[in-house]
Image (cartoon, coloured by chain):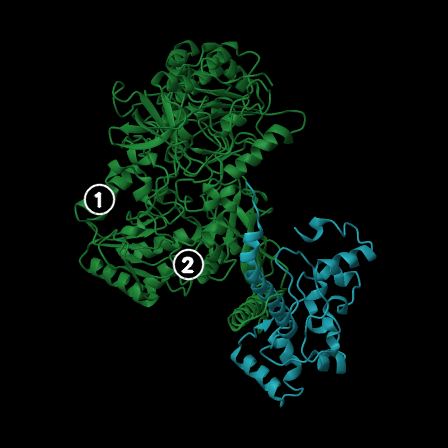
Chain colours: A cyan, B green
Amino acid sequence: MNVSIVPTLKVLKPAARIVLVALVGIAAGYFANAAFFPGTSPEQPIAFSHRIHAGDNEIPCLYCHVQARRSISAGVPSLSKCMGCHAEVAADRPQVRLLASYWENKEPIAWIKVHDLPDFVHFTHKRHVAAGIECQTCHGPVETMEVVSREAPVKMGLCLNCHRENEVQHGTDCWTCHK
Amino acid sequence: MSRVDRREFLKLIGAGSVGTGAGFMLAESIKHPVEYLIPYPVPPEEFSPGIATWYNSVCGMCSAGCGISVRTREGRAKKIEGNPSHPVNQGRLCALGQAGLQVLYNPDRLTAPMLQNGDRGSDEFVEITWDDGLSRAAERLNAARERGGGIYFLSQGVRGHLANLFELFMGELTGEPGSARLLHYDFTHPHALYAANKRLFGETHLPYYDIGNSRYLLSFGADYLTDWLSPVHHSLGFGQSRQGNAGVRGRCVQIEPRMSLSGAAADEWIPARPGTEGYLALSIAHRLVAEGTYRGGDLDAWRAALADYAPERVAEPTGVPEETIARLAREFARAEPGLAIGGGSAAAHTNGVDTLIAVNVLNYLAGNIGKPGGIVFNPDPVTGGSSVDRQANYRAMQSLVENARQGNIDVLIVNNTNPVFTLPAASGFRDALASIPTIVSLSSFMDETTILADVMLPSHTFLESWGDDMPEPGVGFSVGAISQPVVAPLYKTRATGDIVLGLAGKLGFAESLPWASMEDFLKAGWRQIYARGAGESTDFDAFWRDVIVAGVWGENLRRNDNKVIDTSVIEGIGMPAPRFAGDNDTYPFILHPYLTTALHDGRSANLPWMQELPDPMTGIVYGSWVEINPVTASEMGFEDGDVVTVTSAQGSIEAPVLTFPAIMPGVVAMPIGQGHHALGRYARNRGTNPIEILAPETEPASGSLATSATRVALAATGRRAAPVKTGGESRQLGRGIVQSTGGHSGSAGHSARLNSIPIVVEST
């Protein structure tokens, strides 16, 4: 008895074309999403500009993100810190007035995280600041950004390359980051 | 490629669009979820995101009163450790203490005041406001007062200033200060030990048992590593006695019918017949006097009192060979110093107080009173009063039941105690509640008692409340610790003290209880402690801050007074025979219910960590079981996992059999803590509660329930349900590993007897 798969293939032939077109569609849709809706620079509750603060006015990063040198989190400045300057400085600008309204209501601002590592990665700002790593190495040239966006791909490769180049002790051990 | 016709074209268009949509959604779905960074408007002082803040407080999981350090991050409690400065636990903490977090974050906590909306036990509740709840409770209290009706306050055992607040409140409410209607009830309260110390030494408070400095520890039934008084402190002492004293390794001997964790850790485990531990102690005492170890006065009185307890006469009733008794006496006399302690099942017989007196007599005759490594008496608590005499024994609970039945109780306030679960069914407590018109519960959980309440005013957990604690028994000097809230309250609950003050406010007691909050009341109390001696603090505020930061306050005033036992007391020493409920033929076994670290008296059965904690002796997690000697089991045809009914004259429960080599034939043991039908999703419908079938036998001298005095019968049900175990084989099988029972070179007779129950005893 002869067994042939040709009859089966014949039936599949028109279906194959449909599947192929669908796959192309999936790829197109995927990359369209990645290209046009990257989500790397979300709209924040207040249109805060790092370019003005860190770029034009040359405020050091650690002036506001003061926890970075002593904690695992860099921390976002509290409203009281913002108002420390903005009670006087540029108090008439619409976005600063918006800030002042949060302050009057003592309502915390829910900033959206731009640089966010997954929960299974243990990262500490303290050690990296202490080692003299520039903030821009991971966060990109924030001082030029009107709206902060995730430019450097903060993925495992970035961590490992840097750890290898600087010959970090135990820098490539799994448990250094995944603990 | 074939020609594309119209139909084919539409198909391809369809496939392409669906594919594109799917691809888009795929990319969307694997994107990182949006997370927020929410800074404080005004950050608390010294707050840094990502850096933990540690707060010192007091553990509330059992009555030992260990100091804890709680690690918090961003305002949430993350981990509980022992406070290294606290003299009770010195930085250590037991598994139950660690699980305090699961009390705080328990999904079954009562979150707001509630009103019973249907019949009692119907589990229908409506949420009300605090003002409404307090008003309703106050209204009924007022109505009861006007009619001259009975108001009872039944609390879990509390100490420190909260106990004082209860006194003030009940004094005002009933018009009689020191009202007998204020009761503290703990299943585990050692009534017999208090009674024994009172009779022999005239002391109201328990002394400090200095296990750490003793060279020879003779424990009569006290499972000091698991549940006896202050297990974390005793574990430290055990370690010090074994390895911390230069040049000498302390020996430990455990005398009990079923091997506990302390028995397994001991050098020698001696099973004496249940209820005869006191005979053994007096027999050792007889040798101490006969061999001239005792050098005090009243020698003739002692000789006369102990005449009947020569080893040759005691060997028969206790089942411990004469030469073993003589050897124990020799070793105890030679030890410098030795320490004898008693508790657990030895104290839970109808002759419990006499047994504990006999144990204390050993310490007295060996000259261990007021010495390191012996018994050191504690100074009175610095709070001025003590709640120890408030502890309700079984007799007091019975009179509460009787009063309720006769309609003498109008309002019962229950605070975090669960007598429906921890009293035997024979007590009639549950049914008596039906005769009480109003029950107000301050408990944090919907336990078996609270589910029968009418008004629930749920209290904070200990991690959210202000309070303080003076550990009892203390460690030989005055210790106090402030319990501070380590997190903001999670729900609409209130601290117990604040609820009582709220009720007082509604009742118009503003004059006698003027404090706005428990924190104020506590501060007022601690001002008096400050007046005793502030140490280096410059003013009260600095003192208060210092105590809170350290988590503990101490006063190095030690008592090293010796005691001379009165001749009349000596004449009264002796051992009555133990009584057991149920006749020998119908109920051939003695039930030995025991406490576990994990579940305590059942209050922590709602904590998953505790349910999952393997029992140290059997490796079992979850569920209940009945431990039977393998020889008895094979005689009765039981195998591991056979479900049997355990029947006493008072009722019957079911549990699977576990053959356990280190239990005497004739005794069956069951762990306490399971068998809840309330208390939340993790506790409910799991295992059985051996307390339920206990006979209402009391120890006459202390009025406490004799929990080891019930006889039971076992019968097969034909069903099987193997207990969930973490380990496979509990025996060594000749591998010589994990040797838990060390023998003694001179105890050939003892080992031979032990071999009749299959347990390996090898010399260490």
Identify the residue at image location x=39%, y=57%.
B459
Identify the residue at image location x=19%, y=56%.
B148
Figure disc tally: 2
CA separation in Å, label 1 and label 2: 30 Å
Q: Is residue A69 left or right of residue B41?
A: right
The residue that label 1 is drawn on is: B431
- Residue B200 visible in image: no
The residue that label 2 is drawn on is: B495
Q: Nearer the viewer, residue B237 or B427?
A: B427
Q: Is residue B597 left or right of residue B555?
A: left
Count residues near mark 2 (Cα–Cα under 10 Å), then give few for <14, some for 14-19, many for 20+: many
Q: Of circles 1 and 2, which is in front?
A: 1
Q: Nearer the viewer, residue B534 or B693?
A: B693
Q: x%, y% of residue B387?
A: 39, 46
Q: Nearer the viewer, residue B203 or B116?
A: B116
Q: x%, y% of residue B569?
A: 37, 25
Subunit that carries the residue with mark 2: B
Q: Which mark is residue A144?
A: none
Identify the residue at image location x=21%, y=48%.
B434
